[in-house]
Image (tube, grey):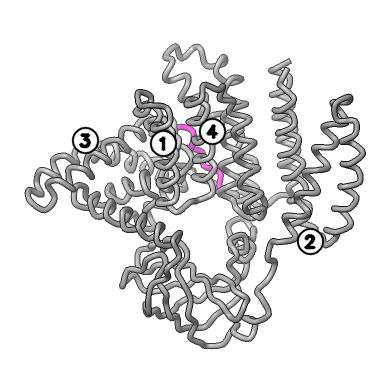
Amino acid sequence: MRPMRSIGLYVYSIGYCIAVVIIVLTDSRIVEASACISIIISAYALARWMNSPPLSSIFVAVLAIATAFARMAFVPSTLPETFSPLIDEPDVLTGVVVSLPDLRETSQRITVEIKSGIQRTRIIASVPLYPSLHVGEKVRLSGTLKRPEPFATDGGRTFAYDQFLRKDGVFGVMQPANVFVIGTHANLYLRFLRMLQVVKDTLMRLFNTALPEPESSLASGLLIGGKQGLGDRLIDAFTSSGMLQIVVLSGYNVMIVADVLMRCLSRLPKKVGFSFGVSSIACFVLMAGAGSSALRAGLMAFFAITARTFGKQYDVMRALSASVLILSVWNPLMLVYDPGFQFSFIATLGLVLGTPIITPKLLFLRSTITIELVSTTLAAEIALLPFLLWQTGNLSLVSVFANVVTMPAVPYAMGASVLAGISAFIFGDTVPVLAIIAGIPAYLPLAYIIKVATLSASLPFAEVILPSFPFWIVLAIYAALALVVVRSRA
């Protein structure tokens, strides 16, 4: 039986997340009334906290709901009125770049915070690829500001692009726009992000020195989240083969880095190892753009490092619940409008709950490594498939095969790419041929991953687009999967 602390964490996390989803989807405005009711019920339940575990769980759930209502009261829902006259009018806006630019093949997308009096908001601008822009720079944008709008996707679906941007406080887009740098903001956090961006740009240049394209861009994607040189065709191949999580920095990549760090730091004094490990993971996630899946994995890595440092037991389910709760309190709209966050959570939950069920069914494979690889891949794929099909309609018939044969190569590709980057740093300017030779061990697994993606995507019926279907079907499938998990543990 799990300790009450774990049960309380699960009850609070589930109650909070469900409440946020309901508030967002119903556009509820009964914050004050619900908060008052929650306080009354919670006060009554608190009086009997020590005598009634079921009542304690009710108290925790109500407290979670009250927290959700209180948190949602501070989430911006629309563009501030001050900026409304700017919509659909050519204008010149001044603001600060507040996140790492998203580099594309021919342009870069920047998130800019603009102010008018005491009000502020964020917009996304698509500007030329050059000059390179950095976090913290004050810029002047010229163009036409528009409200983001939903757009149609495959299978008759609609992607709520406006709500996707809303989760990050973005309520306007300027595409295209001209940009002119007019200064640098003195904010310490932005200056720190700018330093990390300089490190990231340097690493990308080192990879380009040691490796050809597209292997260089894949190395960047594996390690620092850059995929500029891959091109749309190759990205489509990774998507069709179900391997896109390899290109973008995912939770899997973060956990590889965290595992290597914990092994390297195990011989250092505890406090030194803990401080270095936590700060390294934080810088790694921020440098890669702080995507939702990377943040989730970073938090779980923090819990793992903390447990190892202080001799505590690491419970992956508790770590997952705590990570989801922390991220959803920080940004509640992630729960509803961030597919990356949703996919990452579902895949991780599938790994945790599904792998012990699938593994005994694969003992005929005999090889322990093969069994572990196939079982974890199947667990994640089965858990993710219903939601993925409802969200995108993209059914990759080669996904399991492609991921099983490429995942073992990913850690080697990451490690060899790091060594290639170090060699390029040492020899790149003096003896470039040595940097290229040092890049061969990285080139081989990177080229292999790319070849698997392109060959898998080129197979007949590698990808099938399913028409849209109601969400209750997804809930029914997950209910059936939950029943399987419960029966397997009975």
Task: Specify the quadrant that holds the N terminus.
Answer: top right
Identify the amino acid type marked 3.
Pro
Q: Where is residue 87 in the image (x, y as percent from the top left)?
A: 60, 82
Marks 3/4: CA distance? 33 Å
Q: How crowded is mark 1: few (under 14 residues within 10 Å), some or many (20 or more)?
A: many
Relative depth, front residue between 185 and 178: 185
Which is nearer the N-term, disc 1 or disc 2? 2
Relative depth, front residue between 467 and 218: 218
Residue 331 lies, with reference to residue 279, above or below; the image says below
Residue identified by numbered label 4: 303
Provide the secondary structure element on which disc 2 rests. loop
- Asked if the residues shown at circle 4 and circle 1 are in contact, with their CB atoms under 8 angstroms apart, the answer is no
Marks 4/1: CA distance? 11 Å
Residue 288 placement, left or right of 417: right
Which is nearer the N-term, disc 2 or disc 3? 2
Identify the amino acid type marked 2.
Asp
Residue identified by numbered label 2: 27
The tag on residue 441 is: 3
Identify the amino acid type marked 4.
Phe
Marks 2/3: CA distance? 54 Å
Task: Specify the quadrant that holds the C terminus.
Answer: top right
In the image, which residues are magenta?
394-402
Answer yes or no: is residue 386 visible.
Answer: yes
Which is nearer the N-term, disc 3 or disc 4? 4
Residue 361 placement, left or right of 270: right
Q: Residue at x 59, y 73 (%)?
A: 120
